Image (cartoon, rainbow, N blue to C red):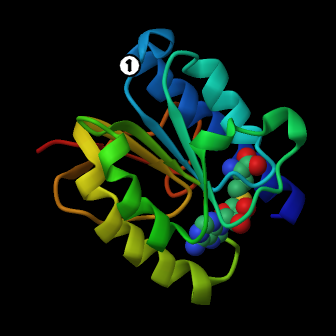
Amino acid sequence: MSRLDSFINRMVAQRACLNFIAAQVHGPTLTEPVLELGLGNGRTYDHLRELFPNAPIFVFDRAMRANPKSAPPEDMMILGDVRDTLPAIRPRLGAGARLVHSDIGDGSRDTTEPLIRALEQALPPLLADGAYIVADQKMSVPNWHALPLPEGIAEGRYYIWQYRA
Ligand SMILES: C[S@@+](CC[C@H](N)C(=O)[O-])C[C@H]1O[C@@H](n2cnc3c(N)ncnc32)[C@H](O)[C@@H]1O
């Protein structure tokens, strides 16, 4: 498969999974926190704020490099390595985040693997019971239950779990 096809498949999977969760939680009515790990260009952040217009969306990245049209409000943009910044956000989350979208892989196994292992530790204390985790990388966490992917999305292309305490 060409890199172009692979990229397109990833974008399609990403959008389908986020839309699927928005349908599960009645997106426009959601007022609980959403976490976006990996702002990048801001494309998925822009989609999240369309799907969840009433939810506080906390956005994490090492640096702000997004298209200015997709820049989060300053107080919702948390800059730094997520391994340092995620634990510090807990007091701002109330009963916990309802959705985490993690799109933080950089294409290198050597750097992504340790980061994902760190997220498996850092994310659970931030979640509300019933929270959804949507991710580009496979994670393995007790009490995170894998959900079937939306129709047409190949296994392993993207991941969805629901946390049940
Ligand atoms: C694939 S891009 C995200 C793309 C984004 N979802 C979009 O739609 O434009 C991954 C982002 O994760 C960020 N990132 C990678 N490792 C990180 C870390 N340890 N802490 C914070 N941000 C990180 C990178 O800086 C990069 O902007």
The answer to which quarter of the image holds residue 120 is bottom left
Q: Could you say where residue 35 lies in the image, as x and y percent from the top left?
A: 48, 44
Nearer to the camera, 37 or 132: 37
Tell me which residue sits at (16%, 42%) in the image: 164
Q: Relative to 44, is 84 above or below?
A: below
Nearer to the camera, 127 or 148: 127
Considering the numbered disc 1 on the image, is that residue within a helix, a strand or a loop?
Answer: helix
Q: Relative to 48, is 51 above or below?
A: above
Q: Which residue lies furthest to the bottom in this view?
A: 110
Q: Could you say where residue 27 lies in the image, as x and y percent from the top left?
A: 48, 16
Q: In which quarter of the image is the N terminus?
A: bottom right
Tell me which residue sits at (50%, 29%) in the image: 56
Left/right placement of residue 44 relative to residue 7 reads left
Q: Could you say where residue 151 lies in the image, as x and y percent from the top left?
A: 53, 31
Left/right placement of residue 92 relative to residue 58 reads left
* Residue on which the image places disc 1: 25
Nearer to the camera, 139 or 68: 68
- Please name the amino acid that badge 1 sits on: Val
Q: Relative to 98, is 41 above or below?
A: below
Total labels: the figure holds 1
